[in-house]
Amino acid sequence: MTPALKPSRNICLPSPNCPCWYLLPAYPLNSMSHVTSRAPRTDQSRCPSSLPADNSMSSSCTRVIVKTPAKQEDFTVADDILVRQFKEKLAAHFECQIDQLVLVFMGRLLKDEDTLSQRGITDGHTIYLVIKSKNGSRSLAHSSQNLPTNDHCHQDRNIKENNSGVCQTAGMSQVPVKSALFIESHVPNVQNQNLEVDNPQHAAQMLENLCFQQLLSNVEFMQQFVSGHLDKQQLIQQNPEVAHLLDNCESLWQTLELIRSLAIIQEIVQTQQPAQNLEHSLNPQPYLGLETIPSGNSVLCQSYADFSDQMFNSMQDPFGDNPSTGLLAGQLTGQVQSSTPPSSQEWQDQYPCLPTTRVICTDSCGLSSVTSTNANPNTLNHTSRTNMISTKDQSHVCAIQQPAGIPILPSIEVMQQLQEENKDGCVSVCSSDQQFEEDFQLLDEQATSQITGGIAQLFINYPHLAAQIMFMSMTPLSEQCRQQQPIFLQQSKLSDLLLALANPKASRAILQIEEGFQLLATEAPILLSCFVPYLSDSCWLPGVQCSFPDTVTRTWNAPDMAEPKRPECCHKSGAVLHRLQSLDGNSSQTPHAPEIRFRKQMKFLQDIGFGNYYANLQALIATEGDTNAAIRKLKKS
Amino acid sequence: MESPHLYPVKLYVYDLSKGLARRLSPIMLGKQLEGIWHTSIVVHKDEFFFGSGGISSCPPGGTLLGPPDTVVDVGSTEVTEEIFLEYLSSLGESLFRGEAYNLFEHNCNTFSNEVAQFLTGRKIPSYITDLPSEVLSTPFGQALRPLLDSIQIQPPGGNTVGRPNGQS
């Protein structure tokens, strides 16, 4: 309130321009520059701090801005006007009753008996006006009695947001509704299959966890959501493999992440190297077009043909259900897969980790620092001889994935070890091993430098894609992205990716990033236990979890402590592999063997004249049932 | 005269990119952004924010974003909950309808700024409100603008603030 000015405490000074007395209050509150005039009225007002000589004190006008929620208007009033009088004026203007008016200035409610200047309202200040409704008070929407309405509202919001996502230009599949952010596109297409109501308890649960993890952990949710989606139907028609993928929640999530990153990188690469002629389109074929790497091309093709059918078919099963993972991890995986007949059970039992391994490796092609599996294969190598082949398989896989990953050394070491140990293995396997090693050395150097070199370049040259990465990493994928995904992946060629990323300095940079992650991992092992269960789902994106990078790297690092000899990336990949093996189990098993799936195509190929059953099978697996592509493949080999 | 009851007003700041912006912005934008900020006002033990679904409210930290990355003390207000809800309802029908949402021009931070000024007379920190112009001043932002313009953000977990039936 205005301090009461008592005449006895003030100094009265005559003013030449105004007959009013000027009072200089003795309080330190009022600066000496302020001049208070004692008007004939009982209330007191303070002039603006302009020169008193320029103000006519008794009739000074103040222009105040009155802001209502809908609009704002200027009002010019005497600065010593009472709030009540001001309200009368406003009530007349806004056609309401004075009782409905509430004036707020600087967070303070203006009382009727104050004057504007008492509250410090001077020229140009903004007063907020709230016109109360005629009825009584309201309660906040989310109080308990409004809960059904809230659920409905939230549900509506869910519906609206269901199929939206950022980056409509990126071929992304759609992440279900429950994510941290719903981003709506303007496209009004809404597949509201998922109408799981976000009841408060569920929302509360979700709040306690990482958004994506919760999202994915709700398998029913995802399945319900995805199954109802029209796009999925189309996708399944295009490729029956996708059905396996989508049915498995975890693999689906992995796929989404991989495809997301893959799509970005592919687009980047594609624009960079449009001349690259890839043999195979990417969606959803499980291998990269490493054939386009000149030096490795012919050698690779031969290597593929030499693979042991048994081994690779066995690997097919755990990998088969996540073909998109194979995209990033590479062509060679797919090639390997194509040549192995199904001795599935044995291999599957031995490689519960393979899908996640692949995921990790493929992810490393993107932003993550997870690299190929190194320690794990070695560990497996040292196990029983009976596991040798399977170990070798895995190492093959890992080594294959090396081109998509970053470090070269581990895979080569592994390969060498495998070669030594598996000398009495299958003849075809051994021969292909040697070839593989040579190939990998070649390919690794090329692909690694290519891949890692390009990532930084990609972001600089294609900022829109980088933005996509940014948004996609934190948002659900839009329905448009899902729709565009098949098209997108078909258009871009993954081998372009490898070829385009050619800067060795960038690979060094990525290695440094991985080292940084390791450092982070050493800092706070506490979070490790919290996030271990999520690792199998979250192995890809350090970007997505950039608020939790330590968790992922911690997980990497913890089992890795025992193997300090490995270079930086190898540390993490092996550690992660350990983790994922223990966690992921057989979550990504595919029930169908490739021969069963491709029975028709196999018959067709044989009718045409390709008599080599296993070669046909390999080709079909590699091309995911694409007969024409398989024929091309067979012709090349 | 008794001193009126003052209610604290806080600004909850969330980084939508979860740290990605801080890492990638130098590469993508050419300038350092510390985050993609989503804000909400917390007063009267409730959190209020604006999204593509209009003005929403929830318990503090009650959206899917979880707890805020930063809490800024805006000040204190005499505005009671009743008056505030009236004000929000009016806002929700006029200036801050759901369809008025625009990622650059009229977003959650616009709302938070408006409400903060109403409640306390103070604005929210400028690094938040300057974010759209920061992004748009880069070639990347300009290039991406058509895409970003279509983005609408609505953190789930809140309930729409509106007038009860029949009230004008």
Image (tube, coloured by chain):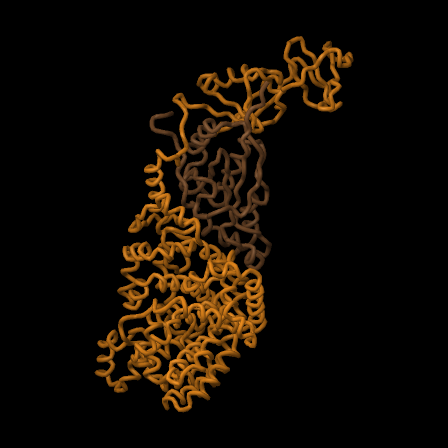
Chain colours: A orange, B brown
Q: Which x, y percent locates residue A349? A: 34, 75
- The picture places residue A8, in percent across and down from the top left corner, at 75, 11
Q: Residue at x 42, y 42 (%)?
A: B52
Write down the quadrant of residue A494 in the picture.
bottom left
Identify whether A388 is placed above or below A124.
below
Q: Quadrant of the N terminus of chain A?
A: top right
Q: Nearer the viewer, residue A471 or A312?
A: A312
Determine the residue positioned at 51% across, 61% down: A462
Q: Residue at x 58, y 20 (%)?
A: B2
Relative image position of residue A471 (x, y in whole percent): 46, 54
Q: Quadrant of the C terminus of chain A?
A: bottom left
Name the residue: 34% across, 72% down: A318
Which quadrant holds residue A382?
bottom left
- Residue A414 drawn at (x, y percent): 48, 81
Up/down of B113 relative to B142, above or below: above
- Image label count: 0
From this view, report whether residue A3 is shown above or below residue A521. above
Front residue (pair A173, A136): A136
Res. A463 visible in picture: no
